[in-house]
Amino acid sequence: MRFLTIKNMVCCLMLLAVWGAPAEARENASGKVTTEQMDWKAFLSRHDMRWDRLTADPVEPTMDGRLRTGYYAGAIMGNGLLGTNFYKLTDNVYRLNVGRSDVTEARSPYDLFNSARLPIGYFTLRTQGNVTSESMTLSLYDAITQGTFGTDKGRIDFRTYVHAKMDCIVFETEASGGEADYVWDFVSQEAVSPRYILNGTAPDGYLNREGKSNPAPERYTRDGVNLLVQKLVADTTFQTVARAYVVGWKEVYEGNKRRIVATVAQADREQDAVASALRTVRKGLKQTSGKLEDEHTAWWHDFYRKAAFVTFPDKRFESFYWAQYYKFASTARPGKPVVDLQGVWPTWDTPWTAIWMNLNIQLTYSWQVKANLGELAQPLWDALWNNRDNLRRNVTDIAGQETWTDAACLPRSATYDFHAPLDPATTVERNQYEAGNLTWTLFYYWQHCLAYGETRQLKERLFPLLKSAVNLFFHIRTERDGKYGLPPTASPEYNVTGNIGPNATYDLANLRWGLQTLIDIDTTYHLNDPLLPQWRDFLNRLADFPYNEETGFKVSDKYEFIDTSHRHYSHLFMIYPYHLLDWEDAQDRPRMELSVNRWKGNQGYSRTGKAAMLASKGDGDGALEQMEVFLQRFVKPNTLYAETGPVIETPMAAVSTLHELYMQDWGDKIRVFYGMPSAWRNASFINLRAKGAFLVSASRQDGRSVFIQVESEKGGLCRLQTGMALADIQVRNGKGEPVPFTPASGEGGVIEIDMQAGDMVQVTDKTRTVVYPAPQAYDKNADFCYGDIKPAVR
């Protein structure tokens, strides 16, 4: 077992001053700037989460958004399926919360009770004495949490992690004095929808006479392995067991050292789940501690090496940014379930028991493409394709729509199979007929395909899915005075009595983007789809976005935008994320400015959305102001986020917005540092991925771009807004040879470069010294860290 000694701690602190390899070493033999020589360990150690005390879990429910303790201040770990959150429970009891993302109720039809994510339980470490000191560090680079608890009877040193490749949790300790007898145990949580725990009410038929949704778990030992078996039943008769999950764990002692390996297995048959749990625990204990940990850390080190690199002059933002890389890789992996609102860190008293489709899933998956981590988003695209029949059933299962077999949609919420029919009747009273949710989700799939040059996925998967999403609008559209419109659909979370009225801007934007994209794909790849003339006709005759000269873009024909604190930007989708309007257009700009300025969203994701809009305008200072509010008001000590319970999407949306400050690729060009705040004089990045399968790297020095590198994976015309004066631009390849380019616009220094697959060019300002991308020294907040909840640090 490897514990952090005082000497090692000193070494780690010394590493904080190391910026990695010199800037010159970032060029490989071909002259290309890469991250190959970067010292990721030194860089990421600057952003480890640290605690010098832990505050006990509060008595109040987690729905209190002000809470900054317990769950929201724990060390979160995971491997895309299993997750843990380690924090303090009471004065001498610590809790290792256990989650598995596919553990849900086994009922039907879908609702927030029958299909709910279920809490599993938690391990407890109970000290023998009274705790006198605490310290803990979560290493982002190694994905390992380690620390020390001192008591009046001894000391416990610990290390814990969720193995990156094996579905097991490892907890290792070395204890001294009376703490050698600390107590380790498992506390199961009732297998019932957290909505029932939170509100105390449930729909008829969900609970039996004893108030149970599932039978009580069974606990026993087999061959030295502790097992807790929870059966999940099909209904309240408990006669049909649909599947079972099993928590298995075993403790092994070696002197004053203790090693615990645990797992959560699930299968349709109880005996299969038990056998799986036994195999995993035995396999984990069979390997030496060092070998098991080396396999774990090797995965994480390789993960960071494949990622894009972004560095900030403010440590708060840089630490936050890299914590999200770590968090998402902890809760999302290829071949694992789609990320819901809780990720792999479930809670027992939350209303968010499923996947929400009207903002949450979209924001969660909005940033991986630019970060060059598309493989972590692929499970969502696979799930949409594999469940395409259910997407159609979401339409045809509604009475009167049985023949609409060419259409598909995503509802407001669903479980992992996406089957939850969307009833138009929900718009009458609840403003919930969100017809465009699938279209919006597919926007990020489209970005993925274009940025990776995934032509096959674009034509064979995205295109038919998008056709189905748009076909729904063909079935429901209206026609008047030669114009096509929409009946009352929905504008998510805009508070109205009754329906929102016709032509909701949310769905007009979804539809307009969907039609334009179908046309572009068909014409680009010569698909000759028979619906092409109908798409063009629909687009050409589609109603304009409702607008009022005093209040800006309206929510619908019926509603002006009056409630300026509306948290969802569903009425502004033509501005962001779709960029259907142009800040440079004389007619669009004043309308966009009025609408964005009037909108004052009151949640964290409102701030990230408005910041992204301002960045697209080139207003980096306004964007930073919004992000400062987000960071200070909404981010928890471990970078989680809460709205009536923990939800994962908003910190992920913040990463997408931070990318917009550094690089934008909407429209017909790649914009480098276009949304950068004036206060961030120096910044750099390596290998942000842009539309067209271009990898872009750049440096900003003293408020100006001084170096841009573009690598083309697929070839094509690269239109680049450099931020340099056209007369001062020079373009060279990796050998230092001049590369021809075409000046396109003096405004922003736009140039065009015709590139072949595998080409790499570097753009510099011949009047300024070249500064290559490298980790930034901090202008301020250099002592900031996440995890530690002392007021002086927060």
Image (spheres, rainbow, N blue to C red):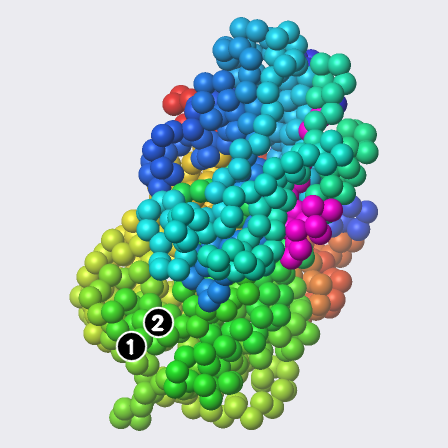
Q: Residues within 10 Å of mark 2 (few under 14, many from 20)?
A: many
Task: Classify residue 720 by image quadrant.
Answer: bottom right
Q: Give the residue drawn at x 45%, y 86%.
A: 402
Can you give x and y, in whole percent of width and height, for residue 432 in the image?
33, 67
Q: Nearer the viewer, residue 461 or 203?
A: 203
Q: Secondary structure at mark 1?
A: loop
Q: Kindly report which numbered mark, 2 or 1, lies closer to the viewer in this rendering.
A: 2
The image's mark for residue 433 is 2
The image's mark for residue 626 is none
Q: Give the residue drawn at x 47%, y 89%.
A: 403
First to last magenta residue range: 259-275
| Residue 161 in sight in this render | yes
- Residue assigned mark 1: 488
Task: Classify residue 284 by image quadrant.
Answer: top right
Q: Nearer the viewer, residue 17 or 748?
A: 17
Residue 500 magenta: no
In this picture, is 327 found above or below 539? above
